[in-house]
Amino acid sequence: MSARQRGTLFVFIAAALYSIGGLCIKFIPWSGLAINGGRTAIAAVVVGSYLILTRHRPQMNRWIFLGAMSVFFAHTLFAIANKMTTATNAIVLQFTAPIFVILFSILCFHKSPSRLDLIACVAVLGGILFFFVDKISAGAMMGNVIALLSGVAYAGVFLLREMPNNDAISSVFWGDVISAVVGLPFLAMETDFSSTALFSLVILGVFQVAIAYILMTEGLKTTPAVTASLVSGIEPVLSPILVALFYGEDVSFMALIGAVIVVVSVVVYNVILARQEVPSGEVKSV
């Protein structure tokens, strides 16, 4: 397995772990900020332990801080959106990230996307638009808007390696710390600490945040940002399926069509990308 293939596999596994977020959040009867504070506090301990084991000292500069704020807002806005709209809407709207990755790559890093990248993102956007067809209430719409903003922040996560003087794992660690500091006061105001809620919180902190982000930062070392964001297309598919199976939340027909469009677009994109692999084993980047 080449370095690029291994990196892509790490990104794929990370996305699969991210997908359990919607389900676990539904089982916790707390506010989005309280949930995010608890899970990121746990994640900060796990990531901090990983840094100690690997003897990697956390760094800080303005670019690492910008990456940390991307992690913070991706965490926080998604947790809030999950409480204000359906898990399906929250995860798929967050998956607008590839579009913002391309936009930021052009505006901030002067990197032009390939034609394949653009076609894939247009197809993904087309699938996402299905989630606006059956808006039900103003509350649901506000949740959709917050989920969309989490997609903007999520794009910053995929661009961690593109930032000058970057250290992606440091951005993840500080992002978790900031999220925990902001969210823990809200957690202190909660009263329902059932075993189901606490178990779900631990799963979120250890697997859905800490281990997933560690794998993502490793995968981004050899995977272009646009490719990584599109490979993560497994997340908006698994998340609503898990919620439907274990929580009983309905998935509308139009939402299913949108999910299928997103997934097919991502799969076709990666098949074509694999065929364009050059002899050295490297893949064309954006």
Image: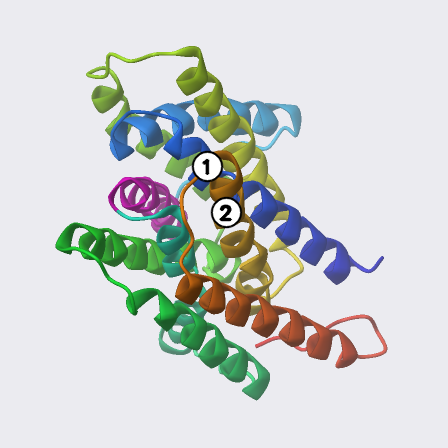
Residue 160: x, y in percent? 48, 55
The quadrant the C terminus occupies is bottom right
Residues 110 and 114: in front is 114
* Residue pictured at 41% horizontal, 78% vertical: 106
* Residue pictured at 36% horizontal, 51% vertical: 90
User: Does residue 201 belong to the magenta stretch?
Assistant: no
Q: Is disc 2 placed on a helix, strand or loop?
A: helix
The quadrant the N terminus occupies is bottom right
Stretch of the chain drawn in magenta: 61-84
Q: From what the image shows, is residue 143 above or below residue 25? A: below
Residues 115 and 142: in front is 142
* Residue pictured at 37% horizontal, 42% vertical: 75
* Residue pictured at 58% horizontal, 83% vertical: 116
Q: Which residue is mark 1?
A: 23
Q: Are marks 1 and 2 in contact (CB under 8 Å)?
A: yes
Rendered image: mark on residue 186:
none
First along the sequence among labels 1 and 2: 1
Residues 119 and 64: in front is 119
Residue 259 appears in the figure: yes
User: Does residue 79 belong to the magenta stretch?
Assistant: yes
Residue 264: x, y in percent? 60, 71
Residue 40: x, y in percent? 40, 29
Colour approach in the figure: rainbow
* Most common secondary structure along the magenta stretch: helix
Q: Would you say 172 lies left or right of 219 here? A: left
Rendered image: mark on residue 239:
2
- In three-dimensional space, the C-alpha distance between marks 1 and 2, rounded to whole angstroms, equals 7 Å
Q: Is disc 1 placed on a helix, strand or loop?
A: helix
